[in-house]
Every structure is written in structure tokens, then in C-alpha cells.
Amino acid sequence: MRVNREKVLGEVFTLQRGFDITKKEQTDGPYPVVSSGGVASYHNAYKVRGPGVVIGRKGTLGKAFYLDEAYWPHDTTLWIKDFKGNHPKFLYYFLKELPLERLDSGSANPTLNRKFVHLIESYIPNADSQKSIADFLSLLDKKIELNNKINTELEAMAKLIYDYWLVQYDFPNANGKPYKSSGGKMVYNEALKREIPEGWEVNFLIDWIKTDKTGDWGKESELGNYTLQVDCIRGADINGLNGRGKVKSPNRFILEKNKHKLLSPFDLVVEISGGSPTQSTGRLTFLTPELFERFENPLICSNFCKAISLKDTNYFYNFVYQWDAIYSNGVLFGWEGKTSGIKNLLFDSFVSSHRVCHPPGYLVQEFSKLIAPIQQKRQKSLKENSELESLRDWLLPMLMNGQVRVKS
């Protein structure tokens, strides 16, 4: 592969500042408006025909985005006006690899000056190699995207089953027909202020919980008696563990005597400190046996989280989706306190006060039989995505500087 050496990027492409547009000026349409953080909204007009490459100019500096379709690059971005014969998708991957966030203008409000980018010197492969590299990396990204789509559909299916069975009470009756819709007997429960199936119990969330474990943070490196190496789940990792983002659990070392804090399959981890004005504390992730395969070390949760285990693991998925409904409905905003400006979930008070339906054991066993294979498939895809992302990120710099070659 022939490489052009010491070429400044101004010879490779030309960047242009994006276009201002106010919310009042926007009319909903098919064209994405791309800001420094990605697609922010849609408009009925566009400024640039695709394919296009955009990088953050103000706000989130240097983050690169690729678009096949026509789009509107926002004033907070820079976009490639002229590719000068280079492959657009290759330049997208190339810009992703550059630490452009370090090139801020030094002003009170950091911005990325296109002139600084134009002056960067770098190795740029020839056109044929650019296409081969872009095609190869695109294959990895497409597989990751496909896995994400499948996982989204699987999770939607699991939630639909939960809603149908344990919210609408149309679980299969003895004849295999939907219970409530087929005339199954319902009784009014005074505590819940609604009807529930006859024979179902009502209790508090605390009645489901057997034990809880506090978190640990340990040390960054092995030091003294801090010798037990672990991967630590923080609140910031919960979305990623649930398949909505990346997991960057830090590697830590804890005291051997704190081994009892290690997490086990069918534990649940709840964020008890953090949140924001628009996001309550109380996000939850659930640890299936397959999830542990995504980590090299034993797992622990941080001090800002709490791990709980249930008295009966048959109720594991029932608890997961029940808690998700509680969180999604904003209930936990009413159970927060503050210390030093940080929001804290009043976990013990909440689980001791919040009443829920307690379905019969035979039903949750059947429910788990449906949900467990779905979650196994999701975890398999998430593990594969993690491996593909690691491969891509490992190869990216070597492909860009010519250390690794891709055959056409």
C-alpha cells in the first residue's frame, strides 16, 4: 500500500463552518439537523447533499459523524465541503481516530478552529486503500448495528410479554386463553386501588429482597492488602449493561476481606446516588449468568450503587420489569434526598413502603421460561458487539498509519 507522507489535511479535504438555525425556524421534515453531539432534530430543508462528514466545532469538540443522506450541518459543527477525491467514509473513520478535542481555540468557550485541523500533518493512504479500509470497518459497524436492532426488538418483545401477562393480567389461564379477557375473576384491592386477579397477594418490595450488598471502590492499583482485582460497575455503566451504550467499568483492587461484596448471577444493581434534574436515581441493571462472560474479572458495584438479591430467583425477571415500570413512570423522583448537592435514593424507605402485586409462583416460572432465552440472546449479541468494537478500535490506528493492510 502506497502512503502519502507529511501531507497536511488542508490538502486532503476542506472544512466549512455549519449553518445557524433556530428552533422557531425549524419545520419537521426528513432531513437531519446535525449538531456537535449528533442528530439533534429534523428539518424540511437541507444545506448539504450526502455523503457527508461532520465534526463537532462547539460543545462536543471533534466528534465525527457520517451521513449518507442530505443533511443540515448546525452552526456548532464543521463539515467537509470538498473531499478532494478522497473516500468520504474513510475520512470519517480517519477523523474519529484524531484527538481533535485537544485543538480547542483556548477561549472561554472552547471551539474547534478549522484552520488548526487543516494544518495537521498525517499519513493518508491512496484511494484504493481508502476504499478497502472503509469497506472493512463498515462491515464491522453494520454487524454491530444489526445486533443492536435485534436486541431492541427482543427487549420490546420481553416488555410486551410482561405488560400482557403481569400488567393487563392476560396471562394464559388453565385453558390457554387470556385470563382477564376470558372472564377470569378479578377482585378490587384497597391498597393498590385497582382490581387484581383473585388469589394474588399484595406485599411490599422489601418482601421480595433477601439481602443487599454495599458497593466498594478500592484502589486504582494493587497496594498493600488491596489485592483482589475486580471490574467495578458504576451508575454510568448501567445503561451500557442494559444494551444502551458502552460499558467502561474501571478495573480496581479491593481488600480480600471484602470478597463478600462480589456480585453473583441474579443479583440486581441499583444506582442510589447521582441522577440529574431530568433523570432520577434508581436506574437498575440485572446480572444474568451470561452477562458475566462480558468481563475478565469478578464484578463489584461502586459506592454509589447497591446490589440486592431476591428470596426467590423465579421472580427475577418479574422484579426487573416491575422496577423498570416504576422508574419509567417517574415514581422515584419522590424518593430522593440530597447530601452535598448529590441526589440520593431513599432505597430502604421506598422498598419498605411501595406495594406491588405478588403473582403466584407457577406463573412467574412460566414467565421466566419465556424471558430467559430472550435475555440470553441479548447478552450474546452484546458480548459480540463488545468484541467487534474492541477489534475495530484496535485496528483503526494501525489501518490509518499503514501498519495493517486490507486487501481489496
Image (tube, rainbow, N blue to C red):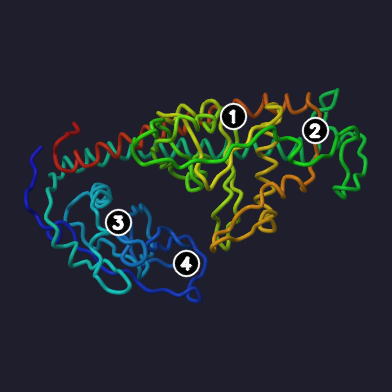
- Crowding near pointer 2: few (<14 within 10 Å), some, many (20+)? some
Q: In the image, which is nearer the foreground, mark 1 or mark 2?
A: 2
Give me the C-alpha separation between circle 2 and circle 3.
52 Å
Residue at position x 76%, y 35% from top?
165
Task: Please say if the residues under marks 4 and 3 sit with CB atoms less than 8 Å apart.
Answer: no
Whether residue 36 sits left or right of residue 275 in the image: it is left
Q: In the image, which is nearer the foreground, mark 4 or mark 3?
A: 3
Task: Please say if the residues under marks 1 and 2 sit with CB atoms less than 8 Å apart.
Answer: no
Mark identifier at residue 44: 4
On the image, the x and y values in percent for residue 359 come to 80, 33
Give me the C-alpha separation between circle 1 and circle 3.
36 Å
Whether residue 261 sits left or right of residue 14 in the image: it is right
Give me the C-alpha separation between circle 4 and circle 3.
20 Å
Q: Residue furthest front?
A: 224
Q: In the rendered structure, which amino acid carries the disc numbered 3?
A: Val
In the rendered image, the quadrant that contains the N terminus is top left
Earlier along the polypeptide chain: callout 1 or callout 3?
3
Q: Which residue matches tag 2? A: 359
